[in-house]
Image: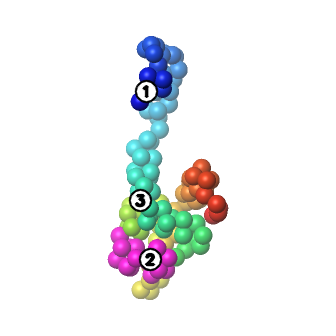
Amino acid sequence: MSNKDTCEIYCYDEKKVNRIREELQKEDISSVSQLVKALADEIRVKITYALCQDGELCVCDVANIIGSTVATASYHLRTLHKQGIVKYRKEGKLAFYSLDNEHIKQLILIALAGSGAKNSV
C-alpha cells in the first residue's frame, strides 16, 4: 500500500462505528464466510453454474459437464451440500442434485455480472 491509499491521520466516526459493530454482531457472518469459501473453488462454481442452467442434475451429468470423474464430482457436490448450497434426492440408484435456494442462483448471477462475464444464467 502506498501512502496515498490510507488516512494520513487517525480518526473515526464513533457513532457510525458503534452502529455498524452492533449490526455486525446481529448477523451470521460465519455462515457467509463458509458459503464464500465453498464457492471459492472453480470446480464448485462450475457445478453451481450448471445447476443454475438446469434445475436438477445427477452426479454423472455433473461429472461430464465439468470433465471429471464421478468420484471428483461427488466430492465437490458433498462439499456444496455440507455448506447448504445444494440439496439432493435419491431415485433408485441415482442421486440428483439441485440448488438449495434461489439466493444461490442470484449470487452466481451477480458474481458473473460483476466479473464482466458475457453470458448470463
Q: Residue at x 45, y 47 (%)?
A: 32
Looking at the rendered structure, the kind of residue marked 3 is Asp
Residue 52 lies in the magenta-colored region:
no
Disc 1 versus disc 2: distance between alpha carbons?
A: 43 Å
Of all residues shown, which one is farthest toward the bottom? 92
Q: Residue at x 44, y 51 (%)?
A: 36
Circle 1: is it few (<14), some (14-19), or many (20+) Cα within 10 Å? Answer: few
Q: Quadrant of residue 60?
A: bottom left
Residue 35 x/y as whole percent: 44, 52
Residue pointed to by mark 3: 41
Q: Nearer the viewer, mark 1 or mark 2?
A: 1
Q: Element at badge 2?
A: loop
Q: Nearer the viewer, mark 1 or mark 3?
A: 1
The magenta stretch is 59-75
Image quadrant holding the N terminus, namely: top left
Looking at the rendered structure, the kind of residue marked 2 is Gly
Q: Nearer the viewer, residue 112 or 106?
A: 112
Residue 68 versus residue 31 in the image, above or below = below
Tell me the tag on residue 2.
1
Tell me the tag on residue 67.
2
Mark 1 or mark 3, earlier in chain:
1
